[in-house]
Image: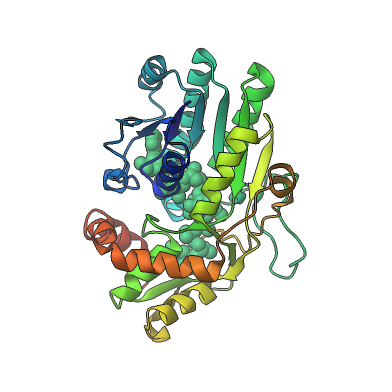
Amino acid sequence: MTIIVTGGAGFIGSNFIFHMQKKYPDYRIICLDKLTYAGNLSTLKSVMDNTNFRFVKADICDIETVCRLFEEERPDIVVNFAAESHVDRSIKDPDVFLKTNIMGTASLMDACRKYGITRYHQVSTDEVYGDLPLDRPDLFFTEKTPIRTSSPYSASKASADLLVIAYNRTYGLPVTISRCSNNYGPYHFPEKLIPLMIANALNDKPLPVYGNGENIRDWLYVDDHCKAIDLIIHNGKVGEVYNIGGHNEMKNIDIVKLICKELNKPESLITYVADRKGHDMRYAIDPTKIHNELGWLPETKFSDGIKKTIKWYLENREWWEEIISGEYRNYYEKMYGAKV
Ligand code: NAD
Ligand code: DAU
Protein backbone atom coordinates (compact mmCIF):
# COMPACT_ATOMS: atom_id res chain seq x y z
CA MET A 1 0.00 0.00 0.00
CA THR A 2 1.39 3.40 -0.98
CA ILE A 3 -0.16 6.55 0.43
CA ILE A 4 0.59 10.15 -0.52
CA VAL A 5 -0.05 12.45 2.44
CA THR A 6 -0.08 16.11 1.42
CA GLY A 7 0.56 18.76 4.06
CA GLY A 8 2.29 16.17 6.23
CA ALA A 9 4.78 18.69 7.64
CA GLY A 10 1.94 20.57 9.31
CA PHE A 11 0.04 19.90 12.52
CA ILE A 12 -2.52 17.20 11.72
CA GLY A 13 -0.72 15.73 8.70
CA SER A 14 2.42 15.00 10.73
CA ASN A 15 0.40 13.38 13.53
CA PHE A 16 -1.36 11.29 10.86
CA ILE A 17 1.97 10.12 9.42
CA PHE A 18 3.15 9.09 12.92
CA HIS A 19 -0.09 7.21 13.49
CA MET A 20 0.07 5.41 10.13
CA GLN A 21 3.76 4.48 10.38
CA LYS A 22 3.20 2.99 13.82
CA LYS A 23 0.06 1.07 12.90
CA TYR A 24 1.04 -0.02 9.37
CA PRO A 25 4.84 -0.29 9.25
CA ASP A 26 4.63 -1.99 5.83
CA TYR A 27 2.83 0.93 4.16
CA ARG A 28 4.90 3.27 2.04
CA ILE A 29 4.13 6.86 3.01
CA ILE A 30 5.11 9.79 0.83
CA CYS A 31 4.73 13.24 2.34
CA LEU A 32 4.25 16.00 -0.25
CA ASP A 33 4.50 19.43 1.35
CA LYS A 34 5.40 22.91 0.11
CA LEU A 35 6.86 23.84 3.51
CA THR A 36 5.00 27.11 3.80
CA TYR A 37 5.36 29.09 7.04
CA ALA A 38 3.16 26.37 8.63
CA GLY A 39 5.22 23.39 7.46
CA ASN A 40 8.18 22.30 9.50
CA LEU A 41 10.57 19.59 8.38
CA SER A 42 11.98 19.20 11.90
CA THR A 43 8.56 17.85 12.94
CA LEU A 44 9.18 14.82 10.72
CA LYS A 45 12.72 14.06 11.89
CA SER A 46 11.71 10.85 13.71
CA VAL A 47 10.41 9.27 10.47
CA MET A 48 12.78 10.82 7.94
CA ASP A 49 15.23 7.87 7.85
CA ASN A 50 12.55 5.21 7.64
CA THR A 51 12.95 3.30 4.35
CA ASN A 52 9.15 3.28 3.91
CA PHE A 53 9.01 7.06 4.11
CA ARG A 54 9.80 9.72 1.52
CA PHE A 55 9.55 13.50 1.80
CA VAL A 56 8.98 15.60 -1.32
CA LYS A 57 8.98 19.38 -1.17
CA ALA A 58 6.37 20.48 -3.69
CA ASP A 59 3.27 22.61 -4.18
CA ILE A 60 0.00 20.70 -4.71
CA CYS A 61 -0.88 23.34 -7.34
CA ASP A 62 2.17 22.35 -9.42
CA ILE A 63 0.45 19.70 -11.54
CA GLU A 64 3.60 18.69 -13.44
CA THR A 65 5.54 17.90 -10.28
CA VAL A 66 2.51 16.19 -8.76
CA CYS A 67 2.11 14.00 -11.87
CA ARG A 68 5.82 13.14 -11.86
CA LEU A 69 5.46 11.93 -8.29
CA PHE A 70 2.39 9.85 -9.19
CA GLU A 71 4.32 8.37 -12.13
CA GLU A 72 7.17 7.35 -9.82
CA GLU A 73 5.18 6.16 -6.82
CA ARG A 74 1.83 4.98 -8.26
CA PRO A 75 -0.04 5.69 -5.00
CA ASP A 76 -3.09 3.68 -3.96
CA ILE A 77 -4.46 6.39 -1.68
CA VAL A 78 -4.08 10.17 -1.46
CA VAL A 79 -4.97 11.99 1.77
CA ASN A 80 -5.06 15.74 1.27
CA PHE A 81 -4.24 17.76 4.39
CA ALA A 82 -2.37 20.49 2.47
CA ALA A 83 -4.08 23.81 2.96
CA GLU A 84 -3.82 27.33 4.19
CA SER A 85 -5.54 26.74 7.51
CA HIS A 86 -5.67 29.94 9.57
CA VAL A 87 -8.91 31.97 9.49
CA ASP A 88 -7.24 35.25 10.57
CA ARG A 89 -4.72 35.05 7.72
CA SER A 90 -7.56 34.39 5.24
CA ILE A 91 -9.27 37.58 6.38
CA LYS A 92 -6.10 39.61 5.75
CA ASP A 93 -5.18 37.94 2.45
CA PRO A 94 -7.61 35.46 0.83
CA ASP A 95 -5.68 34.93 -2.42
CA VAL A 96 -3.37 32.08 -1.42
CA PHE A 97 -6.32 30.32 0.27
CA LEU A 98 -8.15 30.20 -3.06
CA LYS A 99 -5.07 28.94 -4.88
CA THR A 100 -3.97 26.22 -2.48
CA ASN A 101 -7.28 25.12 -1.03
CA ILE A 102 -9.31 25.12 -4.26
CA MET A 103 -6.91 24.92 -7.22
CA GLY A 104 -4.54 22.64 -5.29
CA THR A 105 -7.36 20.20 -4.56
CA ALA A 106 -8.35 20.16 -8.25
CA SER A 107 -4.77 19.55 -9.35
CA LEU A 108 -4.35 16.61 -6.95
CA MET A 109 -7.60 15.07 -8.13
CA ASP A 110 -6.59 15.54 -11.78
CA ALA A 111 -3.44 13.53 -11.06
CA CYS A 112 -5.61 10.89 -9.33
CA ARG A 113 -7.83 10.66 -12.41
CA LYS A 114 -4.85 10.37 -14.73
CA TYR A 115 -3.02 7.63 -12.82
CA GLY A 116 -5.93 5.88 -11.06
CA ILE A 117 -6.16 5.47 -7.30
CA THR A 118 -8.36 3.47 -4.97
CA ARG A 119 -9.18 6.45 -2.74
CA TYR A 120 -8.80 10.22 -2.65
CA HIS A 121 -9.57 11.54 0.81
CA GLN A 122 -10.23 15.25 1.39
CA VAL A 123 -9.56 16.53 4.90
CA SER A 124 -12.21 19.20 5.28
CA THR A 125 -13.56 21.12 8.25
CA ASP A 126 -16.74 21.74 10.25
CA GLU A 127 -16.34 25.43 9.33
CA VAL A 128 -18.03 24.70 5.98
CA TYR A 129 -21.34 24.55 7.92
CA GLY A 130 -20.97 28.13 9.20
CA ASP A 131 -21.89 28.56 12.85
CA LEU A 132 -24.66 27.78 15.32
CA PRO A 133 -26.35 30.23 17.71
CA LEU A 134 -25.25 30.20 21.36
CA ASP A 135 -28.86 29.97 22.59
CA ARG A 136 -29.63 26.72 20.73
CA PRO A 137 -27.48 24.06 22.44
CA ASP A 138 -29.80 21.43 20.93
CA LEU A 139 -28.46 22.12 17.39
CA PHE A 140 -25.50 20.23 15.90
CA PHE A 141 -23.83 20.00 12.48
CA THR A 142 -24.80 16.79 10.68
CA GLU A 143 -23.58 15.76 7.22
CA LYS A 144 -26.90 17.09 5.89
CA THR A 145 -26.45 20.59 7.33
CA PRO A 146 -26.29 23.04 4.40
CA ILE A 147 -22.96 24.62 3.50
CA ARG A 148 -22.97 28.23 4.76
CA THR A 149 -19.51 29.71 5.08
CA SER A 150 -18.28 32.78 6.97
CA SER A 151 -14.60 33.40 6.17
CA PRO A 152 -12.49 33.23 3.02
CA TYR A 153 -10.86 30.17 4.64
CA SER A 154 -14.13 28.28 5.16
CA ALA A 155 -15.42 29.37 1.72
CA SER A 156 -12.26 27.97 0.10
CA LYS A 157 -12.60 24.68 1.99
CA ALA A 158 -16.29 24.43 1.04
CA SER A 159 -15.43 25.12 -2.61
CA ALA A 160 -12.91 22.30 -2.49
CA ASP A 161 -15.53 19.95 -1.00
CA LEU A 162 -17.93 20.78 -3.84
CA LEU A 163 -15.20 20.00 -6.37
CA VAL A 164 -14.47 16.68 -4.66
CA ILE A 165 -18.14 15.70 -4.83
CA ALA A 166 -18.29 16.82 -8.48
CA TYR A 167 -15.21 14.73 -9.41
CA ASN A 168 -16.91 11.71 -7.86
CA ARG A 169 -20.15 12.21 -9.77
CA THR A 170 -18.65 13.32 -13.09
CA TYR A 171 -15.51 11.19 -13.34
CA GLY A 172 -16.32 8.42 -10.85
CA LEU A 173 -13.26 9.32 -8.75
CA PRO A 174 -13.43 7.24 -5.53
CA VAL A 175 -13.51 10.02 -2.95
CA THR A 176 -14.38 10.50 0.70
CA ILE A 177 -14.54 13.71 2.73
CA SER A 178 -14.17 14.23 6.48
CA ARG A 179 -15.27 17.36 8.31
CA CYS A 180 -13.67 17.62 11.71
CA SER A 181 -14.01 20.06 14.58
CA ASN A 182 -11.09 21.97 16.20
CA ASN A 183 -8.04 19.81 16.86
CA TYR A 184 -5.41 20.29 19.56
CA GLY A 185 -2.23 18.42 20.49
CA PRO A 186 1.53 18.29 19.73
CA TYR A 187 3.02 20.25 16.79
CA HIS A 188 0.08 22.69 16.63
CA PHE A 189 1.38 25.91 15.08
CA PRO A 190 1.47 28.67 17.72
CA GLU A 191 -0.79 31.06 15.78
CA LYS A 192 -3.83 28.97 16.82
CA LEU A 193 -5.72 29.52 20.10
CA ILE A 194 -4.40 26.74 22.36
CA PRO A 195 -0.68 26.77 21.44
CA LEU A 196 -0.65 30.58 21.22
CA MET A 197 -2.05 30.86 24.76
CA ILE A 198 0.38 28.24 26.09
CA ALA A 199 3.39 29.98 24.49
CA ASN A 200 2.31 33.47 25.59
CA ALA A 201 1.52 32.32 29.14
CA LEU A 202 4.92 30.64 29.44
CA ASN A 203 6.52 33.91 28.30
CA ASP A 204 4.29 36.00 30.64
CA LYS A 205 2.86 37.82 27.62
CA PRO A 206 -0.76 39.07 27.29
CA LEU A 207 -3.32 36.42 26.31
CA PRO A 208 -5.37 38.05 23.50
CA VAL A 209 -9.00 36.87 23.68
CA TYR A 210 -11.17 38.02 20.76
CA GLY A 211 -14.45 39.77 21.58
CA ASN A 212 -15.96 38.61 24.87
CA GLY A 213 -14.46 35.10 24.77
CA GLU A 214 -17.92 33.47 24.73
CA ASN A 215 -17.44 31.80 21.32
CA ILE A 216 -17.62 28.02 21.49
CA ARG A 217 -15.41 25.49 19.74
CA ASP A 218 -15.73 21.68 19.84
CA TRP A 219 -12.23 20.37 20.67
CA LEU A 220 -10.83 16.99 19.62
CA TYR A 221 -7.41 15.53 20.43
CA VAL A 222 -5.46 15.23 17.17
CA ASP A 223 -4.85 11.44 17.51
CA ASP A 224 -8.60 10.86 17.53
CA HIS A 225 -8.91 12.76 14.24
CA CYS A 226 -6.09 10.68 12.73
CA LYS A 227 -7.74 7.41 13.82
CA ALA A 228 -11.01 8.54 12.24
CA ILE A 229 -9.30 9.27 8.90
CA ASP A 230 -7.55 5.88 9.07
CA LEU A 231 -10.99 4.22 9.43
CA ILE A 232 -12.52 6.27 6.61
CA ILE A 233 -9.79 5.55 4.04
CA HIS A 234 -9.95 1.81 4.79
CA ASN A 235 -13.67 1.25 5.47
CA GLY A 236 -15.54 4.44 4.58
CA LYS A 237 -18.05 4.39 1.71
CA VAL A 238 -16.96 6.06 -1.53
CA GLY A 239 -18.76 9.34 -2.19
CA GLU A 240 -19.62 9.89 1.48
CA VAL A 241 -18.97 12.75 3.89
CA TYR A 242 -18.15 11.92 7.54
CA ASN A 243 -18.33 14.44 10.39
CA ILE A 244 -15.73 13.97 13.14
CA GLY A 245 -16.08 15.44 16.61
CA GLY A 246 -16.23 14.33 20.22
CA HIS A 247 -19.00 16.42 21.83
CA ASN A 248 -16.50 18.57 23.68
CA GLU A 249 -17.76 22.14 23.43
CA MET A 250 -15.89 24.81 25.33
CA LYS A 251 -15.95 28.61 25.49
CA ASN A 252 -12.68 30.22 24.43
CA ILE A 253 -12.40 32.08 27.72
CA ASP A 254 -12.71 28.84 29.71
CA ILE A 255 -9.89 27.28 27.69
CA VAL A 256 -7.65 30.28 28.33
CA LYS A 257 -8.44 30.24 32.07
CA LEU A 258 -7.72 26.51 32.18
CA ILE A 259 -4.33 27.05 30.52
CA CYS A 260 -3.52 29.78 33.11
CA LYS A 261 -4.45 27.36 35.91
CA GLU A 262 -2.42 24.45 34.52
CA LEU A 263 0.64 26.68 34.05
CA ASN A 264 0.15 28.47 37.36
CA LYS A 265 -0.07 31.84 35.61
CA PRO A 266 -2.33 34.75 36.69
CA GLU A 267 -5.60 35.37 34.83
CA SER A 268 -4.56 39.04 34.79
CA LEU A 269 -2.60 38.11 31.64
CA ILE A 270 -5.93 37.77 29.81
CA THR A 271 -6.50 40.75 27.52
CA TYR A 272 -9.75 41.20 25.60
CA VAL A 273 -9.00 42.47 22.09
CA ALA A 274 -11.00 43.49 19.01
CA ASP A 275 -13.14 40.65 17.67
CA ARG A 276 -12.33 38.61 14.56
CA LYS A 277 -14.34 39.88 11.57
CA GLY A 278 -17.32 37.58 10.86
CA HIS A 279 -16.40 35.54 13.96
CA ASP A 280 -18.31 32.23 14.08
CA MET A 281 -20.16 31.84 17.40
CA ARG A 282 -20.42 28.11 17.96
CA TYR A 283 -19.29 24.89 16.30
CA ALA A 284 -20.74 21.54 17.41
CA ILE A 285 -20.42 18.27 15.50
CA ASP A 286 -22.87 15.39 15.52
CA PRO A 287 -20.59 12.35 14.94
CA THR A 288 -23.40 9.75 14.87
CA LYS A 289 -22.70 8.64 11.28
CA ILE A 290 -19.02 7.78 11.73
CA HIS A 291 -19.85 6.08 15.03
CA ASN A 292 -22.66 3.95 13.57
CA GLU A 293 -20.98 3.11 10.24
CA LEU A 294 -17.32 2.78 11.23
CA GLY A 295 -17.39 2.31 15.01
CA TRP A 296 -15.32 5.47 15.66
CA LEU A 297 -15.39 7.05 19.10
CA PRO A 298 -12.98 9.60 20.56
CA GLU A 299 -10.55 8.05 23.04
CA THR A 300 -8.91 11.08 24.70
CA LYS A 301 -10.90 13.10 27.22
CA PHE A 302 -10.25 16.85 27.04
CA SER A 303 -9.03 16.95 30.66
CA ASP A 304 -6.30 14.41 29.76
CA GLY A 305 -5.58 15.76 26.26
CA ILE A 306 -4.98 19.32 27.40
CA LYS A 307 -2.57 18.12 30.11
CA LYS A 308 -0.69 15.99 27.56
CA THR A 309 -0.58 18.94 25.17
CA ILE A 310 0.72 21.41 27.76
CA LYS A 311 3.34 18.84 28.84
CA TRP A 312 4.42 18.49 25.21
CA TYR A 313 4.86 22.27 24.81
CA LEU A 314 6.86 22.35 28.06
CA GLU A 315 9.11 19.50 26.91
CA ASN A 316 9.51 20.72 23.32
CA ARG A 317 10.23 24.41 23.82
CA GLU A 318 12.85 24.49 21.07
CA TRP A 319 10.19 23.45 18.49
CA TRP A 320 7.87 26.40 19.11
CA GLU A 321 10.49 28.89 20.32
CA GLU A 322 12.24 28.59 16.97
CA ILE A 323 8.93 29.41 15.25
CA ILE A 324 8.01 32.38 17.40
CA SER A 325 11.51 33.86 17.19
CA GLY A 326 11.56 33.83 13.34
CA GLU A 327 9.35 35.24 10.60
CA TYR A 328 6.33 34.59 12.84
CA ARG A 329 7.32 37.68 14.88
CA ASN A 330 6.35 39.91 11.94
CA TYR A 331 3.00 38.12 11.67
CA TYR A 332 2.34 38.55 15.40
CA GLU A 333 3.20 42.25 15.24
CA LYS A 334 0.89 42.72 12.23
CA MET A 335 -2.01 40.75 13.78
CA TYR A 336 -1.79 41.76 17.42
CA GLY A 337 0.61 44.74 17.53
CA ALA A 338 -2.07 47.37 17.82
CA LYS A 339 -4.34 45.16 19.94
CA VAL A 340 -2.28 44.19 22.99
P1 NAD B 1 -1.31 23.43 9.11
O1 NAD B 1 -1.44 24.83 8.66
O2 NAD B 1 -0.68 23.11 10.41
O3 NAD B 1 -0.51 22.60 7.99
C1 NAD B 1 -0.73 22.77 6.63
C2 NAD B 1 0.39 22.09 5.87
O4 NAD B 1 0.12 22.19 4.47
C3 NAD B 1 1.77 22.73 6.10
O5 NAD B 1 2.74 21.73 6.31
C4 NAD B 1 2.03 23.48 4.81
O6 NAD B 1 3.42 23.59 4.49
C5 NAD B 1 1.30 22.61 3.80
N1 NAD B 1 0.91 23.36 2.60
C6 NAD B 1 0.29 24.57 2.54
N2 NAD B 1 0.12 24.93 1.26
C7 NAD B 1 0.62 23.93 0.49
C8 NAD B 1 0.71 23.72 -0.90
N3 NAD B 1 0.26 24.64 -1.78
N4 NAD B 1 1.27 22.57 -1.35
C9 NAD B 1 1.73 21.65 -0.47
N5 NAD B 1 1.69 21.80 0.85
C10 NAD B 1 1.13 22.93 1.34
O7 NAD B 1 -2.79 22.82 9.03
P2 NAD B 1 -3.50 21.75 9.98
O8 NAD B 1 -4.09 22.44 11.14
O9 NAD B 1 -2.60 20.58 10.15
O10 NAD B 1 -4.72 21.34 9.02
C11 NAD B 1 -4.57 20.31 8.07
C12 NAD B 1 -5.87 20.14 7.31
O11 NAD B 1 -6.92 19.85 8.20
C13 NAD B 1 -6.31 21.41 6.57
O12 NAD B 1 -6.84 21.03 5.33
C14 NAD B 1 -7.39 22.02 7.45
O13 NAD B 1 -8.31 22.73 6.67
C15 NAD B 1 -8.00 20.76 8.06
N6 NAD B 1 -8.59 20.90 9.40
C16 NAD B 1 -7.88 21.47 10.43
C17 NAD B 1 -8.44 21.51 11.71
C18 NAD B 1 -7.69 22.10 12.88
O14 NAD B 1 -8.27 22.25 13.96
N7 NAD B 1 -6.41 22.42 12.76
C19 NAD B 1 -9.73 20.98 11.93
C20 NAD B 1 -10.43 20.44 10.83
C21 NAD B 1 -9.84 20.39 9.59
O1 DAU C 1 -13.18 24.01 13.32
C1 DAU C 1 -12.07 23.58 12.59
C2 DAU C 1 -11.15 24.73 12.32
O2 DAU C 1 -10.53 25.05 13.56
C3 DAU C 1 -10.11 24.42 11.25
O3 DAU C 1 -10.76 24.23 10.03
C4 DAU C 1 -9.09 25.57 11.13
O4 DAU C 1 -8.07 25.20 10.22
C5 DAU C 1 -8.48 25.79 12.50
O5 DAU C 1 -7.56 26.88 12.45
C6 DAU C 1 -9.57 26.08 13.53
O6 DAU C 1 -10.22 27.36 13.26
P1 DAU C 1 -10.61 28.37 14.43
O7 DAU C 1 -10.76 29.71 13.85
O8 DAU C 1 -11.73 27.83 15.25
O9 DAU C 1 -9.26 28.24 15.34
P2 DAU C 1 -8.36 29.32 16.07
O10 DAU C 1 -7.40 28.57 16.92
O11 DAU C 1 -7.82 30.34 15.14
O12 DAU C 1 -9.40 30.07 17.03
C7 DAU C 1 -10.18 29.35 17.98
C8 DAU C 1 -11.08 30.35 18.69
O13 DAU C 1 -10.24 31.20 19.50
C9 DAU C 1 -11.83 31.28 17.75
O14 DAU C 1 -13.10 31.54 18.32
C10 DAU C 1 -11.00 32.56 17.75
C11 DAU C 1 -10.40 32.59 19.14
N1 DAU C 1 -9.06 33.22 19.26
C12 DAU C 1 -8.06 32.80 18.43
C13 DAU C 1 -6.80 33.35 18.50
C14 DAU C 1 -5.70 32.90 17.56
C15 DAU C 1 -8.82 34.18 20.22
O15 DAU C 1 -9.72 34.55 21.01
N2 DAU C 1 -7.56 34.73 20.30
C16 DAU C 1 -6.54 34.38 19.46
O16 DAU C 1 -5.43 34.96 19.57
Q: Is residue 211 above or below residue 326?
A: below
Percent x, y of residue 160: 56, 35
Using the image as rendered, state which of residue 172 and residue 158 is in the foreground. Answer: 172
Using residue 71 as the reference point, say whether residue 218 is left or right of it.
right
The number of numbered badges drawn on the structure is: 0
Q: How is the image coloured?
A: rainbow
Quadrant of res 238: top right
Q: Position of residue 52 (x, y in %)?
A: 35, 30
**Is 272 situated left or right of 231 in this image?**
left
Q: Quadrant of residue 237?
A: top right
Ligand 1 image position (quadrant): top left
Q: Nearer the viewer, residue 279 or 303?
A: 303
Determine if residue 268 is in view. Answer: yes
Q: Residue at x 22, y 55 (%)?
A: 326
Q: Viewer-proximal residue, 3 or 56?
A: 3
Q: Nearer the viewer, residue 28 or 64?
A: 28
Of the 4 image quadrants, the one containing the C terminus is bottom left
The residue positioned 55% from the left and 46% from the top of the image is: 227
Q: Position of residue 106 (x, y in %)?
A: 51, 26
Where residue 168 sits: x, y (%)?
Answer: 65, 24
Quadrant of res 66: top left
Q: Is residue 36 above or below residue 201?
A: above
Q: At 43% from the left edge and 66% from the top edge, which residue is drawn? A: 308
Whether 123 is drawn above or below 91: the answer is above
- Residue 275 seen in the figure: no
Q: Is residue 141 left or right of residue 200?
A: right
